[in-house]
Image (tube, rainbow, N blue to C red):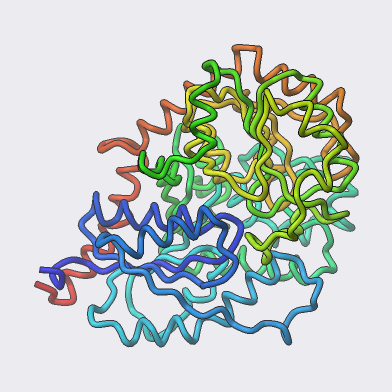
Amino acid sequence: MESSKPHAILLASPGLGHLIPVLELAKRLVTHHGFRVTVFAIAASASPAESQSLGSAASSKLLHVVELPPADISSLVDADAAVFTRIVVMMRETIPSFRAAISAMKFPPSLMIVDFFGFEALEIPEFDMPKYTFVPSNACLLALTLYVATLDVEVKGEYVDRAEPLQLPGCKPVRPEDVVDPMLDRRNQQYLEYMRMGVGITKADGILLNTWEDLEPTTLKALRDHKVMAQFAKVPIYPVGPLTRPVGKEEARSELLDWLDLQPADSVIYVSFGSGGTHSSEQLAELAWGLELSQQRFIWVVRPPIENDPSGSFFTTGKGRGEHPSDYLPEGFLTRTKNVGVVVPLWAPQVEILSHPSVRGFLSHCGWGSTLESILSGVPMVAWPLYAEQRLNATMLTEELGIAVRPEVLPTKRVVRKEEIEKMVRKVMEENHSRERVKEVMNSGERALRKGGSSYNSLSQAASTAISFHKSTGAP
């Protein structure tokens, strides 16, 4: 009977690719751990991939999906407020409708899991149940987030102006240029919100992470060491990843996949900068010329240029501006490359493309979701970070894991020229070391998710608290 199962509720935040890992976490609670699950999602700014996943989850019998209305935050944030600020404020203003929806439930929940942007929901006083924070990114981001309030006292001036790396106890130092977006300007509202988040997410009974033990052993050890970072974490850490969208059904194939079927194995580089990444007109032109010079087959997902705002497509996702790529790419580029490449406006089925045997490389913005999709497809990367925590991710991919190459200077600091783009594309397509290394990391991630694997066991441990709570309430 449904009432005999523990009931988990999950709250996802809009944007930044957080919805898909929340849905995948929910599925694993159902299929592997015997829960009924309700996912609360805010009906705002979902990317096509997220909308597809949400629709699939809603139409299945696996999960119950409730879409909460997006709160009107126009009077609470400036029109040019950072994406981080907008999401935190939107989640804060959504708490009353979230609370009302839970109160109206037929089956009382035994477990609450909130995306870390919704950390303030952890303090809803009337809901007595185990509560977890879900960080849909990695342990490196969590460590920085937990330690930022200490850095605020220790560091004078702007972080990005420092010459020396930021020291996090027990963790690899963080280069000043790699700090997350909220730390770029200490006077900005998003910095204050980020410090509040670092404290607020520890109000949970534990923190779930979209990573796995073998991927970040040093950082995870530091987070658990009571003499090091645990004084900031204060709660158990559960790595439960890698959680990514699975490959879609065969009947949903697109023309892009038909085109890939005609290409030789390991011959195509996929180029995409996520659901919000944008470039200047000058950088788009250099990208086009660099791809053309590389003489590699490619699929390139493009969107119209936006000057000086690398995350400029957020909260307008999927709406586009109507231009055809020929309106903003170099004259003649589409004609000259028509036999070797495909240019796709706005969106493409990324997981299906990356998992295709014709694809060998991925020129990526290094969003954590895209990073995991590339790893689980065994595809090495050209790391091109733009915003959020992507600079941290790019450093991990290149310097720690050895599965990516990147520009000499951050793309957000200067235009990357066509010659360097050509060199990076050729390297990731032609050399074998990163290819072999990413296969090792892929196998490690797959093992972690299997029954008896580290992430499977970690989620079992977190779920056991809720199962015990459910039984203690007298449920049948």
Q: Is residue 307 left or right of residue 382?
A: right
Residue 223 rendering spot, x and y as whole percentages: 53, 47
329 over 310 or under it: above or below:
above
- Quarter of the image for residue 433 reads top right
Give the camera-side residue of 28 and 258.
258
Q: Nearer the viewer, residue 54 or 227?
A: 54
Q: Position of residue 333 (x, y in %)?
A: 81, 32
* Up/down of 246 relative to 39, above or below: above
* Residue 234 seen in the current view: no
Q: Residue furthest front?
A: 335
Tell me the residue at 66%/28% (across/down). 298
Decide which of 398, 426 is in the foreground and name it: 426
Q: Position of residue 285 (x, y in %)?
A: 86, 37
- The answer to whether residue 448 is left or right of residue 280 is left
User: Vertically, is 61 above or below 159?
Assistant: below
How far across and down, in percent of the image, does residue 211 sit? 48, 43
Q: Is residue 304 visible?
A: yes
Figure disc tally = 0
Q: Quadrant of the C terminus?
A: bottom left
Quadrant position of residue 109:
bottom left
Image quarter in which the N terminus is found? bottom left
